[in-house]
Image (cartoon, rainbow, N blue to C red):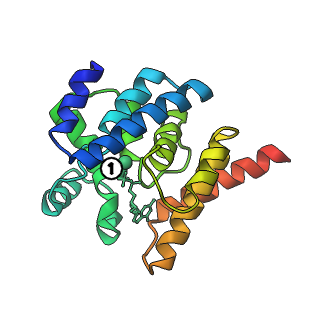
Amino acid sequence: MEREKALQLVKEQITEHRYQHTLGVVETSIWLAEKYGADVKKAELAAIFHDYAKFRPKEEMKEIIIREKMPKDLLEHNEELWHAPVGAYLVEKEAGVEDPEVLDAIRYHTSGRVNMTLLEKVIFLADYIEPGRKFPGVEEVRELAKQSLDKALIKSLQNTILFLMKKNQRIYPDTFHTYNDLLLKLEESDT
Ligand code: DGI
Ligand code: FE
Ligand code: FE
């Protein structure tokens, strides 16, 4: 799909603020894809659509999660997690995006997962460090992103887990599993 067509479809779904965030994710994911050798066109498309479902009503997302037999444990965890798998589903159904790698990058952009692909890592990290992001610690992750995709991802997951814990929020197990998986692989590659 053409960049302009995709952007137009997304713009209708989200707020102006979220659209500006999306443009930041697009720019950053193209940079990361070029730097680390991911498919730039796929990264661009996944970035454009990554928050497509962000403003869908909670009830609609819940219904889709149940009907489409998405992991049931999603429903026990923060609703903020839902727009990622629901987004992958709707982007295929409504926007006609069929590439499974692009859809997986959208599906796992919030929780991460074990054995993330290069494209999934690019989108996950770009979402965290795009220029509009202001949260504490983001600058450190931006610096790490210049040297190591995995080290930057690990730090972003650490920050997110600590942030959620400080707010007494439960942590979705896949987020922990992603963190452990990346750290284990990094340790193995260092030895
Ligand atoms: O949609 P965005 O705001 O651009 O970013 P996102 O898709 O990464 O959503 C992040 C939000 O999800 C953030 O406010 C934290 C929240 N969240 C709640 N529980 C979890 C979680 N994020 C992760 N990774 N794991 C959780 O268990
Ligand atoms: Fe998101
Ligand atoms: Fe986002």
Q: Position of residue 24 (x, y in %)?
A: 40, 39
Q: Is residue 58 left or right of residue 51?
A: left
Amino acid type at image mark 1: Ala
Which residue is farthest top? 2
Q: Is mark 1 within 8 Å of ligand 1?
A: yes
Q: Where does the N terminus fall, quadrant-wise?
A: top left
Q: Residues within 10 Å of mark 1 (few under 14, many from 20)?
A: many
Up the image or down, 14 lies above or below 67; here it is: above
- Name which quarter of the figure residue 12 lies in: top left
Q: Write the residue at 44% across / 55% down.
A: 111
Q: Position of residue 126 (x, y in %)?
A: 48, 41
- Which residue is disc 1 drawn over? 84
Res. 78 in view: yes
Q: Position of residue 187 (x, y in %)?
A: 77, 52
> What element does badge 1 sit on?
helix
Up the image or down, 10 lies above or below 53; here it is: above
